[in-house]
Amino acid sequence: MLTDIAQATRPALVLTGLMFALTGLAYPAAITGIAQIALPYQANGSLVSRDGQVAGSALIGQSFAGDGYFHGRPSAAGKGYDPTQSSGSNLGPTSKALIDRVTGDVKANPGAPVDMLTTSASGLDPHISPEAAEWQAKRVAAARHIAPSKVYALVDNAVEMPLFGFIGEPRVNVLKLNLALDKAVGKGAQSPR
Amino acid sequence: MAAGMTLSGWALIATFVALCVAMAKPIGLWLFALYEGRDTPLSRVLGPVERGFYRLAGVDPSREQNWRQYAVAMLLFQLATALATYALLRLQGVLPLNPRGLPGLSPDLAMNTAISFVTNTNWQAYAGESTLSNLSQMLALVPHNFLSAATGIAVAFALFRGFARRQTQFVGNFWTDMTRITLYLLLPLACVYALVLVAGGVPQTFASSIDATTLEGAHQTLVIGPVASQEAIKMVGTNGGGFFNVNSAHPFENPTALVNFLQMLSIFAIGVGLTWCFGKAVGDTRQGWAVLAAMMILFVAGVSIVYWQEAAGNPLLHHAGLAGANMEGKEVRFGAAASALFATITTAASCGAVNAMHDSFTPLGGLIPMFNIELGEVVVGGVGSGIYGFLLFALLAVFIAGLMVGRTPEYVGKKIEGREVKLAVLAIVVLPLCILGGTALASVLPAGLAGIANKGPHGFSEILYAFTSATGNNGSAFGGISANTPFYNGALAVAMWIGRFFMMVPVLAIAGSLAQKKYTPETTGSFPTTGPLWIGLLVAIILIVGGLTFLPALALGPVAEQMAMLAGTTF
């Protein structure tokens, strides 16, 4: 046994060093190099700019509170949509805190679809269901003093459908929809809360 | 169809299963070339690297090892890599590539994380985005994703050789197995897959954060980094340790439903390939298909229950006026079907990545992931560990069949005798001992109870899940539990270590014992180990052993919670 250990010591130490260098430095560095050259938009976080300023990532949800914007789902990430603290609520199905929260939210938001009153897994969910977008359309139209039909048309346009009909769920990217909304009717048209 | 389930949901599940079966042979062929030590098309490019590694390390690739030497080499390598990671995590504060100035990890967290990654568990007591620098993610964690996976496959290869070889003490060479699996299988797969993930939206940069101004003028800090390179091997190697706290639920780790589908396939890819490779190695591919069939029966049963429960939703929320599926802790782009499927896959394999929060699943929807791990993660399972764990159950099954017909049991041409059965049982009982013992301890100690997030039976489930996940080297969690405490960091590290190596060493001992035996040709009196009777027996043995051992604990957790939920009780 002792000779077995003695024989294995050098390979164990040397291969640890070599393998760490290969898989921990060379591999991520090579992938980063190729990705930065070939796919810079995705590799850098699918950033969305407005007026020359980074307005967020197309993949990451953000907080919207004003009536003139579509809202995302409730978020358990920090104070809401904080990417430095991704988190779900981790409330169990019989949690009193969960049932009380939902009961209150249902009263305050009659008719809201299920995704609007449940927290997402990441706290950064960029999407809502098409139903949730339609449910908010009237409020958005009223706040912006425009015809609801115009907002419904924007929602229709923003709906993404499952690939091949079964990979994924019908969804609306909230940030993209709000950007489209601002572009169509102007930022200034929204009334502050 | 019951409430909430859809045709497209079932189409997703059916397509996934079909593709898994279709992958088995092509990936199995690739694995078989490595098993035999043959040159692969990549040898031309990477051959010099391989030979250079051996020269520097003083490894003679033509020298084989007996099972003891193989086990010693494997264990020393685990120790060396664990210490390297421990040191890197402790020294994080003074090492480069840390623009956010994150400090070194505490001793207990660094130890827990090092063991977690060495054992292929990838339990996340840490929150990636707030605890780890880019250098730590890349250099301290990613190598384990390769090396623990390669180690698992190497041990499986040694066991295959035990079955396939006759009257020899040699089971292979750990150094060449590990090096070749890393260079010719994991590294090329990870490179291609990482770039596919980037194309799908997963970031890959050395930058660590980006400041954004939201449409409403608020400030948002986007955490970013070399995510794709970690994500790729995290899936292929069934590791599961995420770049971010919420793992594959994070839109940067898993941005689209298509990427999600690829991630699910990649968790099972090598595992299903190993079933075919096993059949080929023992000279009868039907043996491999029989193993895969038993696995898929258990898998489809599991995913059906989870999907049914998650799609049906939470009656307490329905009563509160919110109809629909259980969307608490789920992402809209995945919905109930892809979340249920992912949860079943990740726990059937020893992956532990999550795309939804298991803590918020319905009681029975959360029971199945736990039960999958408690069965020993033999439903496809972790890379290597799944197939050798499954073969332990196969030994148990032929032993029981042998008792019933009164003959010495045989499996794929080898007589199975007292020594093999004892070792198999040893490896199989370690799992319940560690899970139930650890859970019992944590349920009475104040330090254990302090970690619970939810009250009532769900709190017990959180503890049970933690020890199940650690011992099974899974790494998923009922995430509400506060596991970054000295008690849980220590206790779960012990569970992870025992769950990994008290399984691997007996498996290698079995390999050594089998390799020395003569070939026993199949006769008309042999119990057939292909066909429906055998598959049924395997499924039954796995369920009975898992069921009898864990049902009492599950009754206290998820089953009690289900009853409470139906009765309208909250905690």
Image (cartoon, coloured by chain):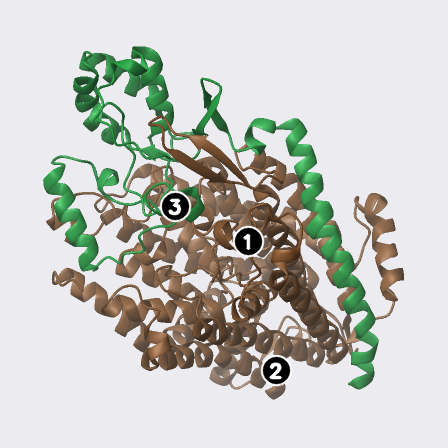
Chain colours: A green, B brown
Chain designation of label 2: B
Q: Which residue is mark 2?
A: B420
Q: Residues within 10 Å of mark 1 (few under 14, many from 20)?
A: some
Examine the image and state in which quarter residue B59 appears: bottom right
- Find residue A81 and report its horizontal and vertical position in percent: 36, 40
Task: Identify the residue under disc 3.
Answer: A122
Secondary structure of the residue carrying tag 2 is helix
In front of the other: B391 or B261? B261
Is residue B145 shown left or right of residue B453? right
Which mark sits nearer the N-terminus, 1 or 2? Answer: 1
Which x, y percent locates residue B498?
55, 77
What label does residue B102 carry, if any? 1
- Would residue A51 be visible to someone looking at this image? yes
| Neighbours of disc 3 within 10 Å: few (<14), some (14-19), many (20+) | many
| Quarter of the rendering occupied by the N terminus of chain B | top left
Give, as a three-letter code, the residue at label 2.
Glu
Q: Secondary structure at mark 3?
A: loop
Q: Residue at x 52, y 76 (%)?
A: B494
Q: Amino acid at mark 1?
A: Leu
> Mark 2: few, some, or many residues within 10 Å (few <14, many ≥20)?
many
Q: Quadrant of residue A17?
A: bottom right
